[in-house]
Amino acid sequence: MDELKRGDVLAGRYRVEKVLGEGAMGAVHLCTDQQLFGARWAVKSVGLAGLGAAEAEEATALFLREADMLTRLRHPALPRVVDVFREGDRHFMVMELIIGETLDDRMTRQRAPFGENELLPILRQLASALQYLHSLSPPVIFRDLKPSNVMVTVDGKVQLIDFGIARRHKPGRKADTIILGTPGFCAPEQYGIAQTEPRSDLYALGAMAWHLLSGQDPALVGFTFPPLRQVAPGCTAVTEAILARCLAFNVEDRYPSAAILLADLEFAGSRDAIKRELELLRKPYVARAPVLSPRGYETRRLVGDAQPLAAAAVAQADTPSAPPFEPVRPITHRAGPALDEARFLRSWLARTFEVWWGPGSIHMPRIIALMLLMTVLLPF
């Protein structure tokens, strides 16, 4: 089948207007619906021309799996599919039209990394979408979360696009049948060492956020990401701790679920998080190195917060065996616990009294002699 051009009509209904995007296997066109009062749709096509029998079968299977999956999913961050058909050697999928730009295009346009306050609302919406996908039975694993697969509409709504390699989790399987993903963003287990699972998407979310905040290519760092504030100094300690947990190499060390990640993302950027960050900045003697635990609660431990995060309640409900949290006091340059101003003042006064006025003080005879001398000299 020849390349689609403006004016072509598909399935006797969809008139091609222009190309919205192109890829290795196909393209997405803007089409008007001649049977539905000129409604506009995004029509995704996958061509089979030039492919061998095995490749054509694989491409068809991936396309039909994506179409079948999207027709069953219902979430504000997922595109809606209204029609699927085949003409000649091409498969077509008609989806709702999304007016906006991908995160990759936005960073290219603004020629600078994202700001933390700009990115956090996007991450929260993505975590909500992943929470929905992972809550299905069996869970749906997106497997290719990256800036070019996330669109933001003109009103700030996030849309996940390209479910081409998404799959349903199959318990008991040791590895994926086909190794797919984008280097730098996909989790270590996607390289064939284990089966991808919901926490693989959380790793990809962390890698994407690290890339968008730092402007650096995650494919160049392997699986050892530098701390966020080392490459993006303007970010907060709370966000750094969240991404560190998402990017843990071992699956067990990551967030147990997207719900807990979403709760921590809601906390990040809040007034409480900013207050904790300012308290750290006011105390230069406090070491800011995070104290991490295998089960998490990094955000609370990092800022020394005695008040529970919203995520802590979710975590205890999600993992009943999790030990109770014990607040970690800030580390000081001196040995011993850190003292606040009031305790320090009381300790200093008590120590001064003990040294100068306490029993057995070597200064007491000198003080008495000085008082007697003043008594004698004052009348003169």
Image (tube, rainbow, N blue to C red):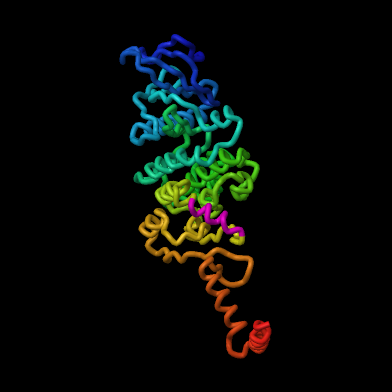
Query: Viewer-proximal residue, 91 or 357?
Result: 357
Residue 198 appearing in the image? no
Could you say where residue 363 lies in the image, as x and y percent from the top left? 66, 85
Q: Does residue 79 show up magenta in the picture?
A: no
Could you say where residue 374 lies in the image, as x and y percent from the top left? 66, 83
Please tell me whether residue 30 is drawn above or below residue 156 in the rendered image.
Answer: above
Residue 287 appearing in the image? yes
Please tell me whether residue 344 is drawn above or below residue 276 in the rendered image.
Answer: below
Q: Does residue 279 show up magenta in the picture?
A: yes
Please tell me whether residue 232 is drawn above or below residue 352 in the rendered image.
Answer: above
Could you say where residue 9 lies in the image, as x and y percent from the top left? 40, 11
Residue pictured at 47% horizontal, 59% vertical: 305
Among all residues in the image, which is located at the extreme front? 380
Q: How many marks?
A: 0
Residue pictured at 55% horizontal, 74% vertical: 347
Among all residues in the image, which is located at the extreme top? 7
Majority secondary structure of the magenta segment? helix
Could you say where residue 203 lies in the image, as x and y percent from the top left? 51, 47
Q: Quadrant of residue 349?
A: bottom right
Residue pictured at 49% horizontal, 12% vertical: 5
Query: Viewer-proximal residue, 349 or 229?
Result: 349
Q: Which residues are magenta?
A: 275-284
Residue pictured at 68% horizontal, 82% vertical: 380
Query: Viewer-proximal residue, 40 or 156?
Result: 156
